[in-house]
Image (cartoon, grey):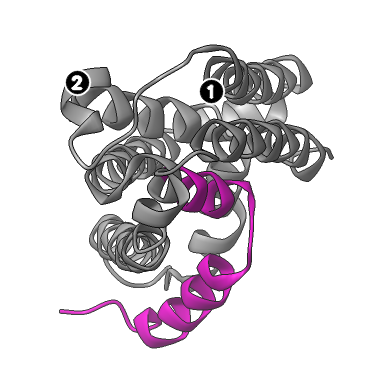
Amino acid sequence: MLAPMLPSFLLVVLLVELTPGPNMGWLALLSASEGRRAGFAATAGIGLGLAIVAAASALGLAQLAHASPLIFNLLRYAGAAFLLWLAWEAWSVEREVSPSAVHRNGSAARYFRRGLIINLLNPKAALFFIAVLPVHVVQNGPVAMQTAQLSIAYVAIATLIHITIVLLAGRAHGWLTSGPYAGLVRRGFAIMLAAIAIWFFVDTFR
């Protein structure tokens, strides 16, 4: 039996996920600078991160983080700091970039972990499961089953949108990372990534 409010929930998720945000910006930059393989690996990490946050919300852990200003702000600071560290790494480390660069400069697991960490440190993901998802759960029905269905639907839609971003941004990988201006482009991406870190910090301010 499907959750009664699943159609309206799907529309809300689609609108939320299509709204540009730090997560979307980071994934697009990664796919353009490192290629689709890195982007797909990061997408898998993001999906797992969202699933873990959904499970934590069901157990009440995300609500605890939301209710505690200390925990909430720690997540904000840690998430922004992690993105700034990625920006510094991109700026300072000279790398040879080619279609097989992911194999030489770090396995797909590296980008998977980064996608996972960024989403686990994003308090706004927890807020969605705390404030939006419960509104679409009918209380006189099987609450646990509805919550599971809506959570799975959210992760699925987010993943499909992220895959689309990877495919589109990945098309620019070849001409952005080859030729005499590859180093300049890489540093430009580092600056944009730092801007995304600041965006992440401001976007999660409450």
Tag shown at residue 104: 2
Q: Is residue 106 visible?
A: no
Q: Is residue 48 left or right of residue 176?
A: left
In the picture, which quadrant includes the C terminus? top right
Give residue 22's position: percent from left, percent from top. Answer: 63, 47
Count of labels shown? 2
> What residue lies at 76% left-to-right and 45% top-to-bottom?
203
Residue type, label 1: Ala
Q: Earlier in the sequence, mark 2 or mark 1?
A: 1
- From which residue to which does the magenta span run? 1-30
In the picture, which quadrant includes the N terminus? bottom left
Residue 22: say if magenta: yes
Residue 29: say if magenta: yes
Q: Quadrant of residue 113?
A: top left
Q: Alpha-carbon distance for marks 2 and 1?
A: 15 Å
* Above or below, 13 relative to 100: below
